Image: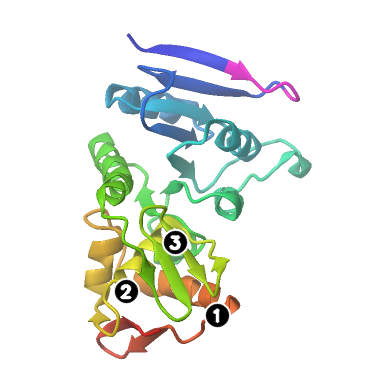
Amino acid sequence: MGGYETRENDSDGRTTRQVGKEAMSEERILIVDDDPALVDQLEATLRQAGFSVFSAPDGRTALQAARAYGPHLVILDITLSSNEPKRAGPHDGIEVLKQLRASSDMYVLMLSGTDAEIVKVLAFRMGADDYLTKPFNTDELIARVQAILRRGRRDKTKPASELAFQSVRIDPAARRAWCRGVLLSLTPIEYDLLYALASNPGHVLSREQLIHHAWRHNYAGNERTVDVHIGRLRRKLEEASAGGVITTVRGAGYCFED
């Protein structure tokens, strides 16, 4: 039988709820939303699907929960409203996303009340792995969650053959990449794009092919969103003195040349 466990933060009394069939199930999900009715619905739906679920009502509590419980996936509302003073912590979902990305590579699914392309691009630019517009069908949510988490499970079954080039080295078993000996801080999507390109050196991969490799069947947006992630990946490579490793082939796609 499922159950509820409520834990309070010692400092301010805000609560983080844990809901799950088992307290330590294989995959943990953190829900960050200030709408109690929606959180209750998502908790029930995800619990029924077999996940261990935590929830947080605001940005500060969410970051504390992420550090404490190490979720595999965070479902994050892009707009968090609160009457608390700004000093209490981040209130905007994008700011929470940025702070999560600064310290981890856990998957993040953004929830939003708008499907405006500029908002989607911003979320992806900041490192979101997927984006779902409210209101949504819970079956679609579960399908997206499962698709995101399948990426990690499939990667663990791949042969751990290392890819080594002049300036870039990739360890598929650890899902890590180094540039001139320096570990790159990559989001899961950025890693998947780099691995896909590096696995086919000298060959042009179209945006559609890169979508298949990085998002597989879990993609919301147009092909140009790939450009945003490639741009972020390129900047990180350039900062590590490996500019020019990923080249653009106009009208065709991208190519890895190291």
Q: Residue at x 59, y 37 (%)?
A: 67
Q: Residues within 10 Å of mark 3 (few under 14, many from 20)?
A: many
Applied colour scheme: rainbow
Looking at marks 3 and 2 on the same chain, the residue that comes earlier in the sequence is marked by: 3
Q: Which amino acid, by three-letter code, is at mark 3?
A: Phe
Q: Which amino acid, by three-letter code, is at mark 2?
A: Leu
Looking at marks 1 and 2 on the same chain, the residue that comes earlier in the sequence is marked by: 2
Closer-to-camera residue (208/198): 198
Is residue 53 depicted above or below 247 in this figure?
Answer: above
> Residue 252 lies in what quarter of the image?
bottom left
Magenta-drawn segment? 7-12
**Is residue 180 visible to us here?**
yes
Q: Which amino acid, by three-letter code, is at mark 1?
A: Glu
Q: Which mark is residue 124?
A: 3
Q: Which residue is mark 1?
A: 238
**Is residue 116 visible to us here?**
no
